[in-house]
Amino acid sequence: MDEPNRSSTEPTTAAAPRTLAFLALRAVQRGAFADVALDRALHPGGLSAPDRRLVTELVYGCVKRERTLDALIDQLARKKTHQQPPDLRAILHLGFYQLRYLDHIPQAAAVDTTVELARQQKFGGLTGVVNGLLRQYLRLAAGGADPLVLPQDPIARLGVLYSFPDWILEVWLELLGLSQTEALCCWLNRTPHLDIRVNPLRATTEQVQAALETAGLSASARVGLPQALRVEGREGLHPKRLSAVGPIPSLPGFTQGWWMVQDSSAQWVGHLLDPKPGEVVVDACAAPGGKALHLAELMGDEGTVWACDRSPARLKRLAHNAQRLGMHSLEVCVGDSRDLPQFKGQADRVLLDAPCSGLGTLHRHADARWRQTPDSVQELAELQRTLLEEAASWVKATGTLVYATCTLHPAENERVIEDFLGRHPEWRVAVPELGAAVAATPEGWVKIWPQQQDMDGFFMVRLQRNG
């Protein structure tokens, strides 16, 4: 069946959020990043806060659960997913997602608005098919069994149930085993939490807690991290998205520079580097700047933190945040960190938070699980090795280097470090003492598993020269 030629018609009030979600999903299918497509869909404004949250949930949820939703289409429809017109596939995704994952949406509303969306998008001749498929799902569910039939193969079963590609599951199963891999999949499919880092030069954690609680939010301390608070509301918060009390910049203390958003695991990176007042510190891949600003805070804003990145636009965001937080020790350097000879032998401490596949933060980046591949991981690993070679040359004879990623793939973590140490016997792993919240492995590096420590997945290791 050829995809019909469509023009938009005015949606009903009830269908409006679904229409915007559909337009964003259509853009994602055509290559757009999910967050960019969502921002464009929401940009005109006019929606209520609950409707904005619904659009966000539908877009991120359908992208995240793509494999599961495709499996439902394959099992219930006469034509398989790859035979469906792309727009009809997106409409069916929206319907099945509401029925399967959104308990607060009445089933009749989910079916009716999906059928109306199909009609609005010129699939009038197929509204009966859409209605029938969704009601078939409901009949099967009413019988007490899950309408989703899972494969027998363990990898395929996890892949269909939790919507991950097989190659990622193969990596995790080898490292973790079946039970922990399933727990990790569950964690990475949850709505992201919101952690913030208090700026001690502007406020205390108690002050920030009190202000947030006055606004109706709960702010709880994170063990071992003196600046970290986890913020929760009755309906939860999503980073950079409209929360139950409004957008993040409207929360108490934001404009005053009392805090910035940063996950707990990312805050451990700054403590691992442990910069001191008066030192010269270089952050090799700094944008958007959360870790560079944390380093400046840990130094009491005394010394120099060079924030390097090849993206001038992203460094502008960093400079804006530095101004909001009242930081004066930050210097920006626009350039590729594979070729910045001016830093050779100049830094007391260097942070290389390397570009990576982001497998530890898949809950925050809905489409990343589908964009990364085994080939892209290998390309990233080569880049990481090159960056590490260059960053190591910046460190003084008695200095410290921290390598970090937010991925959970050994090719980008352990193997990069093992390869570096094998070629550079003058360097060694300096085993950290970070406390009970996170602990070093026997090899000396820190690997944070989300399902075990309830924070983003991270790998980090501190290196020092011998002698």
Image (cartoon, grey):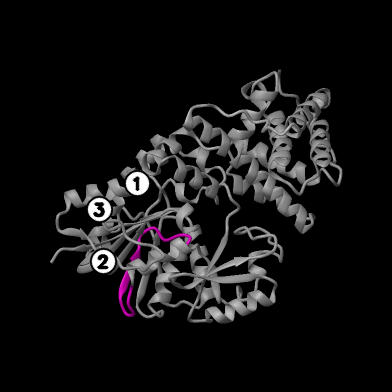
**Can residue 388 be seen?**
yes
In the foreground, 305 or 115:
115
Mark 2 or 1 closer to N-term? 2
Q: Residue at x 52, y 37 (%)?
A: 164
- Location of residue 19 with respect to 139 vertically, above or below: below
Q: Residue at x 75, y 24 (%)?
A: 4
Q: Position of residue 311 (x, y in %)?
A: 45, 55
Q: Is residue 142 magenta?
A: no
- Location of residue 374 with respect to 389 vertically, above or below: above
Badge 1, how many Cα within 10 Å: few under 14, some, many 20+? Answer: many
Q: CA distance from mark 3 to mark 1?
A: 14 Å
- Location of residue 214 with respect to 156 vertically, above or below: below
Q: Secondary structure at mark 2?
A: strand
In the foreground, 129 or 11:
129
Q: Kindly identify which numbered label has been placed on residue 400.
A: 2
Amino acid tagged 2: Thr
Q: Position of residue 466 (x, y in %)?
A: 15, 63
Report which residue position mark 3 lands on.
389
Residue bounds of the magenta highlight:
275-288
Q: Secondary structure at mark 1?
A: helix
Quarter holding residue 308: bottom left
In the foreground, 131 or 10:
131
Amino acid tagged 3: Glu
Mark 3 or 1 closer to N-term? 3
Report which residue position mark 1 lands on.
412
Quarter holding residue 31: top right
Q: Secondary structure at mark 3?
A: helix
Main SS of the magenta segment? loop
Q: Residue at x 62, y 23 (%)?
A: 82
Task: Point out the image quarter for the N terminus.
Answer: top right
